[in-house]
Image (cartoon, rainbow, N blue to C red):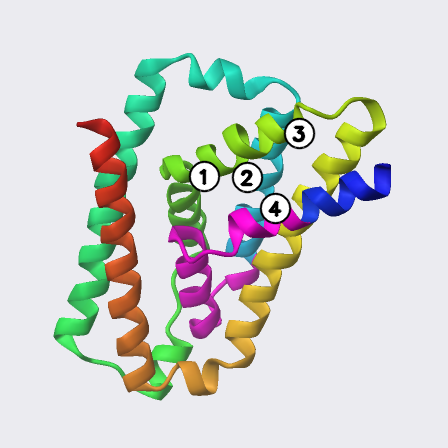
Amino acid sequence: MTTSALFQGLILGLGMIIPIGAQNSYILSQGIKRNHHFLAATICMLCDVLLIGLGIFGGGKLIASSEWLMLLIGWGGVSFLVVYAAISFKSVWINQYSVATHITATTSRKKIIGTTFAVTLLNPHVYLDTVMILGSVGGTFDGNEKWAFAIGTMLASILWFYTIAFGAAKLAPWLGTPNVQRLIDSLVGIIMLIVAYSLLTTLI
């Protein structure tokens, strides 16, 4: 039974995390630039692991019961996503892409850490997926099965984020070409605005 719970956690975890969102887009972008991409993946993974554990072992109800906290997270997320979308569209508008400069361009480790935490913790969808949904399903298990389910969901985050970071870095010579990078920045901007709009509709 514990193996079944582990497998259920892995599958459900992948189902929650694979759809393109703010975290995936950001790690993909950093992987193409080969700029602290594994650091960004590690931060996203650790945040997911902590939030999944919080949700499955009882913390989800506490967060859901705090209306002001959910509003704070929601408006903060909308603001950040709109700003990040604007930065992506600015890159497309300026159109200063080149293979050599874009792939080797670096951002400071401190900025990468700050931006990755913002992309993760200011996005209410992260809490919905990890704390609420996975937490609710995990709460139906008991004892060793609950631990197995939790490990499965956490394993999904570990595998997925490092796969994105590694894959993007390996494909950087192709993904980092000006036309492809312009397309990716455009898609990232659009995704950020869609997520921001979806959050906004839940707030007003």
Q: Is residue 99 magenta?
A: no
> Can you say whether 190 is above or below 79 in the image?
below
Q: Earlier in the sequence, mark 4 or mark 3?
A: 4
Quadrant assignment for the C terminus: top left
- Determine whether the residue tagged by mark 4 lies in a helix, strand or loop: helix
Decide whether the magenta segment is chiefly helix, strand or loop.
helix
Q: CA distance from mark 2 to mark 3?
A: 18 Å
Q: Residue at x 44, y 73 (%)?
A: 32
User: As drawn, is 62 to the left or to the right of 85?
Assistant: right
Q: Which residue is mark 3?
A: 138
Residues drawn in magenta = 11-38
What is the C-alpha distance between the residues marked 1 and 3? 16 Å
| Residue tagged 2 | 47
Q: Earlier in the sequence, mark 2 or mark 4?
A: 4
Q: Please name which of the two marks, 1 or 3, marks the residue nearer to the observer.
A: 3
Tell me the CA gap for discs 2 and 1: 9 Å
Q: Secondary structure at mark 1?
A: helix
Name the residue type under label 4.
Gly
Is disc 2 in contact with disc 1, using a CB cutoff of under 8 Å? Answer: yes
The residue singled out by tag 1 in the image is 126
